Amino acid sequence: MISSIIHITHKYDDDNEPWPIEIEDHNGVMHAVSLEPGQMLFYESAVCLHGRRKKFKGQYYGSLFVHYQPVDPQIWNYTIEVSTDSDDDDGYDDDVVVVVDNEVTVDYFACLSCSHDS
């Protein structure tokens, strides 16, 4: 799966302290990327660990997230199942389960489709 972040705008408390996204490449090396308004970042979101570990320090941060996946199941045999069962005692209302060839490969919490960074 290829994802892109289209960065729209931000207002940091201090421009010298951006809010980078960190992405682990295929060799296990972490890269911090600070986007400016109008920039787009492509990355393999299903394969490369990614996230923001720093607390956001600012007024707002706006980005659009777009995800692309092959439609041919011979190429992309992943499904994503969302459960709203809050009885699993993990402290989160929604769980995301990634299934490959009818076997659960990853079970974790996440936010899908729409994100609001601030």
Image (cartoon, rainbow, N blue to C red):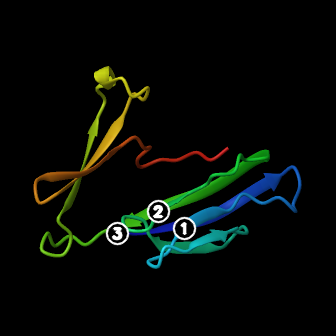
Q: CA distance from mark 3 to mark 2?
A: 12 Å
Q: CA distance from mark 2 to mark 1?
A: 6 Å
The kind of residue tagged 3 is: Met
Classify mark 1: helix, strand or loop. strand
Residue beneath the point at 78% across and 60% down: 18
Element under disc 2? loop
Specify which label sits upstream in the sequence, 1 or 3.
Answer: 3
**Residue type at mark 1?**
Ile
Residue at numbered disc 2: 49
Q: Position of residue 77 (x, y in %)?
A: 17, 65
Q: Report if the CB atoms under discs 3 and 2 are less than 8 Å apart.
A: no
State yes or no: discs 2 and 1 in contact (Cβ < 8 Å). yes
Q: Secondary structure at mark 3?
A: loop
Residue pictured at 71% horizontal, 46% vertical: 55
Q: Earlier in the sequence, mark 2 or mark 1?
A: 1
Callout 3: few (<14), some (14-19), or many (20+) C-alpha neighbours within 10 Å?
Answer: some
Q: Which residue is mark 1?
A: 23
Say whether disc 3 or disc 2 marks the residue closer to the N-terminus.
Answer: 3
Q: Specify the amino acid type for callout 2.
A: Leu
Q: Is residue 89 shown left or right of residue 101?
A: right
- Which of label 1 and label 3 is nearer to you? 1
Q: Is residue 77 left or right of residue 24?
A: left
Percent from the top left, x then y, of residue 45? 42, 65
Disc 3 target residue: 1
Q: Position of residue 94 (x, y in %)?
A: 37, 33
